[in-house]
Image (cartoon, rainbow, N blue to C red):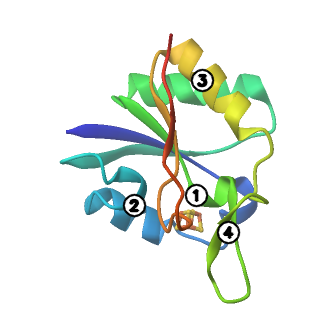
Amino acid sequence: MKNIGLFRCRDNENNCPLTSCIRSIEGCRQGFASYEQARLVGVFSLQTSLENNLAMADILKQKGADTIHFVTCAFCHKDESKTWHLGKGFFEGLDELAKTITDQTGLPCVKGSAHLPNNYQVEQFNSQ
Ligand code: SF4
């Protein structure tokens, strides 16, 4: 069983209630397709402060998360036809943040949740 801590985007938190993210976790699909079973441990919204993001990652770990995921809309965008593409997501500098969280917490950080863009290979950061 994978215990998922999820980071979502503040800029989207009043528009999307995470429906597709939650369904993807429950069904082990999309960004969670490599897991046999998964459950959501908790959700935080990404902040502009690195310190705050690191503190929240620590809390997710304390609450039992063994893997951190970042929602797809953090690093992807949707076009007029509702097709998702890499880039122009809601959060700048996600790779740096994912690496830093992995280094600090020792937890793998994974970019992706629901509706992944075509041909996107799920990117995961592991501690060294
Ligand atoms: S990835 Fe999709 S379902 Fe998840 S928070 Fe972003 S827009 Fe909502």
Mark positioned earlier in the residue sequence (3 or 1): 1
Return the mark for residue 72: 1
Q: In 3D space, how far apart are the residues under numbered discs 3 and 2 (Cα atoms)?
A: 22 Å
Mark positioned earlier in the residue sequence (3 or 2): 2
Give ligand 1's quarter of the image. bottom right
Which residue is at the front of the view, 92 or 59? 92
Return the mark for residue 14: 4
Quadrant of the image containing the N terminus? top left
Return the mark for residue 8: none
Disc 4 or disc 2, which is closer to the eye? 2
Q: Residue at x 47, y 56 (%)?
A: 113
Name which residue type carries label 2.
Gln
Q: Is residue 88 left or right of residue 117?
A: right
Disc 3 or disc 2, which is closer to the eye? 2
Q: Residues within 10 Å of mark 3 (few under 14, many from 20)?
A: many
Q: Kindly check if marks 1 and 2 are in contact, taking CB atoms under 8 A apart as contact.
A: yes
Label 1 sits on a secondary structure element that is: helix
User: Hey, which quadrant is residue 89 in on the image?
Assistant: bottom right
Return the mark for residue 30: 2
Name which residue type carries label 4.
Asn
Whole-percent x, y for residue 77 in the image: 71, 67
Whole-percent x, y for residue 20 in the image: 44, 70
Name which residue type carries label 3.
Ile
Q: In 3D space, how far apart are the residues under numbered discs 1 and 2 (Cα atoms)?
A: 10 Å
Name which residue type carries label 1.
Thr
Return the mark for residue 101: 3
Which residue is at the front of the view, 39 or 74? 74
